Each structure stands twice: as C-alpha cells, then as structure tokens.
Image (cartoon, rainbow, N blue to C red):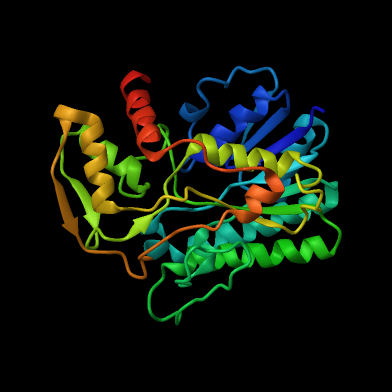
Amino acid sequence: MTSRVLVTGGAGFIGSALVRRLLEEGHAVVVLDNFWRGSMHNLRTINSHPSLTVIEGNVMNSDDLQRAFDALGGVDLIHHLAAINGTKWFNEAAIDVIDVNINGTLTALRKAMEWGARFVLASSPEAYGDNEQMPLHHEDTSVFPSAASHQRFSYGASKYLDEVALHHAVHQGLDARIVRPFNAYGADMLGDEYGQVVGMFFQAIRNQQPMTVHGDGTQTRSLTHIDDIVEGFYLAGSLDVGDDGTPLSGRSFNLGSQDEISMLELAATMNQIVGSLAVDCVLAGGYPGDSKRRLPNIESAQTALGWSPKITLEAGLAMVWEGLQTGP
C-alpha cells in the first residue's frame, strides 16, 4: 500500500538513501531539511521524481512540519532522522546538539500524535552512554558519567531522552519504533573533519594525505553499509507487526555488523582496496569519552524485522571506493 512519508533530515547521508528506497517502493515522500549538513547533491538521482517533495525548513518549527503535511495532503509515517551528529560537534557545540536533537524530536513527536502517523526514531548506540557490556542488547541500561567530565554525551544523552519521550508517546497511543544504526558508511557520507571515519579516511586518500586516527587506533567499531542500514529503517517503518507476530510499537532495533574492526585495521583494509593510492596513517589525540568498543546485539532486529546485515566490510568498502571514482 502506498504511504505518505515524511523524512526529516531527508537530505542527509542516511536520510537521502532512505528516501530513494521509499520512492522505489512506490511511496509519496516529503523531505524536510535545513540543509546545514544535508544537501541536494545527496538527492541528485531522485530530485525530479514526481512523488518527491523537498521542503527547506527547521524540524523544531511546528509550522514547517505542517507545511510538509500539507504538501502530501497528510502523513502516514514519519522517519525522524534530523539531528546534529558528528563527534567534533558533540564537544564544540553541545548546547546546539542538545537543543536540536531533543526539541526537534519533541516537535516531530507531537505532530505524529496530532496526525496519527506512525513514527520511527533514528536513535544511536551513543544512547547507551558508557555501557561497556558488549554486545549491546536492545534493552541494555544506559550509563552516563559526570556531566563535568566532557561534553561528548550531549549527543548520546539527547538520544536517550528522545527514546524516553518516544516511550511516553507510545503510552499515549502512538505507534512508534526506535532504530539504532551502528556506524553507517557509504559513498555519500561527508569526509570533512566533522564527518565519520570511513568518509574521512577515503577523503584523505583522495587528497593523498595521511589518514588521521584519533586515539591509539585500537578502538573498534561495527561498520555497517548504508544499504543494510536503509533496509532496517524501511522494515521498521513498513511492517505492521513483527515477523514473529509481535507488536512493534515501543520496540527498539539495533542495526549493525557483527564484525568489529579497529581503526588501525580499518586504515590498513582501505589501503589494500585503493592499491597504489595507499597513504600513511598517523595517530592524533583521542576524543574525550570515546568508546573503546561498539558491538550490537541484533537479536531483536533479526526476530521481529527479519533483518540482518548482508554486505561484508571488504565488499562494502570496495563499493564505496568505486562509487567515489565513478560518481559526480
């Protein structure tokens, strides 16, 4: 059945990939984005699609959300991805991170309740805080340090509170689900200093400059290709009940690879992929509060959504590199 879908942050890295998938499935989509980090470039292959409407606006502004609603004559589903993300921002712009991530979610949740729209929240493994119990189960406890120690958890705590607000809305009758993507990567991710590690490493290679590894390089992540991440988001929004017959409202789903890789190993793997363009790797100061490990338990996503990652890291990185060579 065709749905009318609002994607906040739909011009961003994950958001734009999700928009493409929704259009491929025949849905009418409206994107709301302020284009601070998102861009029309991310929507370049679909920006003339007859079922796509793009609105420049602020997710914290109820009137802008209403404009999105009016553009489609109603909204059946909200995928809420609008947020400030990026490790440097967590420390440099903590107040803005908290403001946008919490107030944007509250505004979008209120609209979902007003409209009777299903709601999918893009949360984050950062919502677990300092929990070091790996793999991270979908209902594991969140652990946060003293607020005086550093500002990294301006982001993680904002996502935790987003989840609290969502559960309150569920108790009020809203059909809402939580998705936590673990370290998504793909060809359209930003590679500047405020971006994510795969994007930054490939950008360094393209510029023939050393890859900068923060910390000692032994910290691990579960890098997950964008196609797998989008599949999880799509299932979380489109399924009325789980594959196992259970209700999905109020459930949370960790989406991530089951393979950990250290940052030094990642740099070496990427150098193997680019061959003669390989560059050196240099160590730099680590970020305050940076997690040593990040590994998801994906049991909930496997059981209820029928989801599991399909693309290996080596294959995914090769796909990204090819896309960077052939893309505009």
Q: Is residue 64 visible?
A: no
Q: Is residue 56 above or below residue 130?
A: above
* Quadrant showing the N terminus: top right
Question: Is residue 262 rendered to the left or right of residue 163?
Answer: left
* Quadrant showing the C terminus: top left
Residue at figure coordinates x 41%, y 50% from the top left: 259
Question: Is residue 80 rendered to the left or right of residue 84?
Answer: right
Question: Is residue 182 rendered to the left or right of residue 77?
Answer: left
Q: Which image quadrant for residue 272?
A: top left
Q: Position of residue 161 (x, y in %)?
A: 62, 67
Depth check: give the residue in front, 258 or 68.
258
Depth check: give the residue in front, 29 or 99.
29
Q: Position of residue 17 (x, y in %)?
A: 54, 33
Q: Position of residue 274 (x, y in %)?
A: 23, 30
Q: Is residue 22 visible?
A: yes
Marks counted in the figure total 0
Q: Is residue 88 above or below residue 277?
A: below
Residue at figure coordinates x 42%, y 38% from the top left: 312
Question: Is residue 173 rendered to the left or right of residue 226?
Answer: right
Q: Is residue 236 above or below residue 56?
A: below
Residue at figure coordinates x 32%, y 29% from the top left: 321
Q: Position of residue 315 (x, y in %)?
A: 38, 32
